Image (cartoon, grey):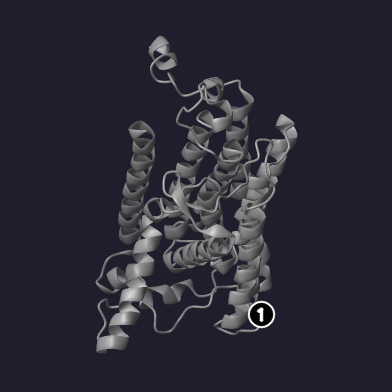
Amino acid sequence: MSGLLAGPALAGHGPALVELASSSSSPMRQILFAAAFALVLSLVGTPVLIRILAKHGYGQMIRDDGPKAHHSKRGTPTMGGIAFILATLIAYGLTKVIVGSMPSASALLVLFLFTGMGLVGFLDDYIKIVKQRSLGLRAKAKMAGQLIVGIVFAVGSLNFADSSGTTPASTDLSFVRDFSWSLGPVLFVLWALFMILAMSNGVNLTDGLDGLATGASVMVFGAYVFIGIWEYGQTCSSAPTAGAYCYQVSSPLDLAVVASALMGACFGFLWWNTSPAKIFMGDTGSLALGGALAGLAICSHTEMLLAILGGLFVLITLSVIIQVGSFRMTGKRVFKMAPLQHHFELKGWSEVLIVVRFWIIQGLCVAVGLGLFYAGWVAS
């Protein structure tokens, strides 16, 4: 069996993937260390954060027009995104120190986007709680913060080329890899901003039930661990022969390490965020997770594939667009309430039932997305 795995399973995958298959290799250690450190830090750190937030009375405000079952959640500590943001950053840093490798520009840019969007969300949450203003940051201020962080990321991703001259992002559109539709720098920045805002708001809208957004994010980050490992094994810098099919991606292994840390941190947070939630991630967490997903997609050159991998976020965002559009055009609502998860709550589904079924949908989206990613390699 070991011979079969070492033969056909790895044949043609390049020397880097053969190296990665060894359990003692540095690449695999980085991924395992990042996930383990983030998991432990988040699992242990979240209850500490819960006590701190509860002590200061930083509890969740609940809309009066929402599902009645949510009123019992009033006062639950929020801003829990702080826990998995810190866990991810510390886990990535520890991993780099232990294995003795330098951080890549791609990884640092994704972490910057992740943290920057989290900071915007933190300000929004803080104003809601401390100043008792239900809308938090003013819409223009919140948008300005997201745009500033997004523009810095987008411009930075077109710079900081690696040793092979490859920048973290490409001005070409991408699905499972780049294809020859170049946007140019200006349109690329606008496209990156659209992705960042869309995914951040998508995760934010999904974060309406205990554990729903956290569990769904774990699945997508897991997919990006696989994508990063695969691209590392097929990177053009290690292509065995000239003209062989390869991925022109900067530091794909380090992107897998970041995705692994994010996955582990979200797993640890989910222990406390699942129903009945002891803490909510708030905008601090949802904006950060959405930014990280968009950043990973842009830097791994799988931009349009993210719409499939994160299919649940897209579906829930579409439910809001449909609801608003229908009401403005016809005066009628398609759903009992938007986002979609609240429609099923008002139909009488239990919260746990909705979350589990939506997780199943998200799992199918990830399976289809990874299948398309692999099919793109096989077809070429």
Count neighbours of disc 1 (C-alpha within 10 A) and say few if under 14, some if 14 to 19, many if 20 or more: few
The image shows residue 263 at horizontal and vertical percentages of 53, 46
Which residue is at 71% across, 39% downward? 94
Residue 157 vs residue 294: left or right? right
Look at the image and tell me whether residue 45 can be seen.
no
Whether residue 226 is situated above or below residue 13 in the rendered picture: below
Residue 202 vs residue 283: left or right? left
Q: Quadrant of residue 133?
A: bottom right
Quarter of the image for the C terminus: give it: top left
Inspect the image, locate mark 1, and give the three-letter code of the amino acid beneath it.
Val
Which residue is at 38% across, 68% downward? 317
The image shows residue 159 at horizontal and vertical percentages of 67, 51
Tag count: 1
Whether residue 83 is situated above or below residue 366 in the rendered picture: below
Residue for badge 1: 130
The image shows residue 44 at horizontal and vertical percentages of 63, 48
Quarter of the image for the N terminus: give it: top left
